[in-house]
Amino acid sequence: MQWNAGGWFGGQVGATLWILVAGLLTAVRDLSTGLLVVALFVIPNVSGLLLWLSRRFSCYASTQIVIALAGVCGLVTVYVLEQANHWQQIQTGAAVSAYSTYWIIGSVFIGLMLTFHLRFGRGRHDAGS
């Protein structure tokens, strides 16, 4: 597994951009909740940027950290929006229940972590890559 700017930042932002959109849509209705959700977008993205800049850990370990942070922040986002009664309000078209979203996010991020572990995490990575 090699460090690659397009893959790193594309995956990181791609996994979390929906949180930013949800935060902005919520901020129009409820500024404090919207800002909290935007902060949940910032956490994995700033962490990812710092991991990229320092490259203190292997690319594999750093990827696992960002995947875990994005997954947890995604789950917390749904929880915050659901508790503030904004989850259904910010959706257009066919709404997805919070319960289903917890399962979707959990499945996707656990699947990603498992896939990366099977592909890269069994002794084939090193601190320099």
Image: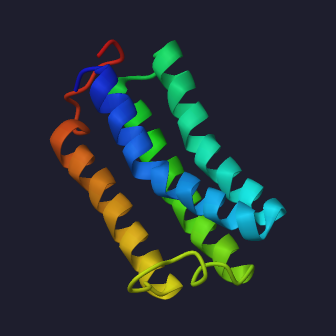
| Quarter of the rendering occupied by the C terminus | top left
In the image, what residue occupies the spot 51% across and 15% down? 53
Residue 54 x/y as whole percent:
52, 14
Residue 80 x/y as whole percent:
69, 71
Q: How many marks?
A: 0
What sort of colour scheme is used for the picture?
rainbow
In the image, what residue occupies the spot 42% across and 47% down? 67
| Quarter of the rendering occupied by the N terminus | top left
Q: Nearer the viewer, residue 21 or 108?
A: 21
Residue 63 x/y as whole percent:
38, 36
In the image, what residue occupies the spot 51% across and 32% down? 48
Tell me if residue 56 can be seen. Answer: no
Q: Quick check: 122 above or below 78?
A: above
- Farthest residue in the right direction? 32
Residue 68 x/y as whole percent:
47, 50
Q: Nearer the viewer, residue 121 or 91?
A: 91
In the image, what residue occupies the spot 75% across and 70% down? 29
Task: Indicate left or right for 72 with 128 as reference.
Answer: right
Q: Quick check: 115 above or below 77?
A: above
Tell me if residue 119 can be seen. Answer: yes
- Farthest residue in the left direction? 119
Q: Nearer the viewer, residue 76 or 61?
A: 76
Q: Quick check: 11 above or below 81?
A: above
To which quarter of the image does residue 60 belong?
Answer: top left
